[in-house]
Amino acid sequence: MLQTRVIPCLQLRGESLVKTVQFNKFGYIGDPINTVKIFNDLYVDELAFIDITATVEKREPDYKILHEIADECFMPLSYGGGIDSLQKAESVFKIGFEKMILNSAPFYNLSVITEIAKIYGSQAVVVAVDVKKNFWGKYEVYSNSGKINQKKEPKEWVKMVEDAGAGEILLTSIDREGTWKGFDNTLVKQVTESTQLPVIANGGAGSVEHISNVVKQAHASAAALGSMVVYQAKDLGVLVNFPDREKLENAIR
């Protein structure tokens, strides 16, 4: 197991895996079950799945595909998308997922974090904080798959969800997501310096060096990978993969 977690963060759209760029245009990746089988063979430590249309379409998680994923998967799983109540979270926990990723729901009902954490523990509640720079270069938090500007600074929102009982932050730079340009280390450092919670950096990873930088310079507790683990390289075809473990260990130790 890697000392610093490096987590494939996979996007569901219906029953298919896709990969977006800056939360907009997406490319088809393939079948999530086959992808899980490959990650099993690669001995990945942890997987995250996010249904990118559940909240926008105002529907519940696709429990059928989540059952299939959990039945096939050998490693700990987290899930986000359409979780806006304790009851829906319970349904996904019962399937076999260990963590819930909440993004939009806490803006309208902050207590949903507390309710889930009271029963399953804070470590089971991850709050996804999606951030974009405005015209003046100020960071603002978005919800609903990056469609609604909540007019909050990341540090302000992270403090609120920490107080509500969240156990971890999945911090995504919308501007960097899917670009291969590297994490927004300035954003990540602002958040890591303002909270006691572990912060998973997400959005922009394109190399092992990018992972090393966000851990060493911005003090991320973990790194989430999207494009890097589903494509051969930038502008090349689909290839489910994972960085060489020895290179990762050397880069982030």
Image: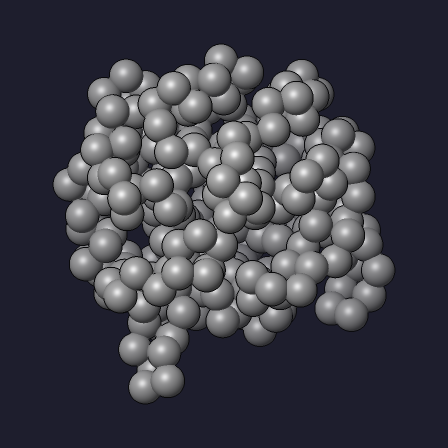
Q: Is residue 165 visible?
A: no
Question: Residue 131 sits in which quadrant?
Answer: bottom left
In the displayed orientation, state which residue is furthest to the front. Answer: 58
Number of numbered callouts drawn: 0
Question: Residue 44 sits in which quadrant?
Answer: top right
In the displayed orientation, state which residue is furthest to the top. Answer: 94
- Nearest the viewer among 250 and 82 is 82
- Nearest the viewer among 176 and 55 is 55
Q: Is residue 29 above or below residue 167?
A: below
- The image's colouring method is one colour
In the displayed orientation, state which residue is furthest to the left. Answer: 163
Q: Is residue 129 above or below residue 50?
A: below
Residue at image position (54%, 30%) is: 61
Residue at image position (28%, 47%) is: 107
Q: Is residue 54 above or below residue 176?
A: above
Q: Is residue 24 above or below residue 75?
A: below
202 on left or right of 154: right
In the displayed orientation, state which residue is furthest to the right. Answer: 237
106 on left or right of 175: left
Location of residue 205 in the rendering, given as x and y in whole percent from the top left corner: 57, 62
Q: Is residue 222 visible?
A: yes
The N terminus: image quadrant: top right
Location of residue 175 in the rendering, given as x and y in whole percent from the top left corner: 49, 71
Location of residue 92 in the rendering, given as x and y in whole percent from the top left corner: 49, 21
Residue at image position (32%, 19%) is: 120
Residue at image position (66%, 21%) is: 64
181 on left or right of 136: right
- Nearest the viewer among 7 and 22 is 22
Location of residue 87 in the rendering, given as x and y in whole percent from the top left corner: 38, 19
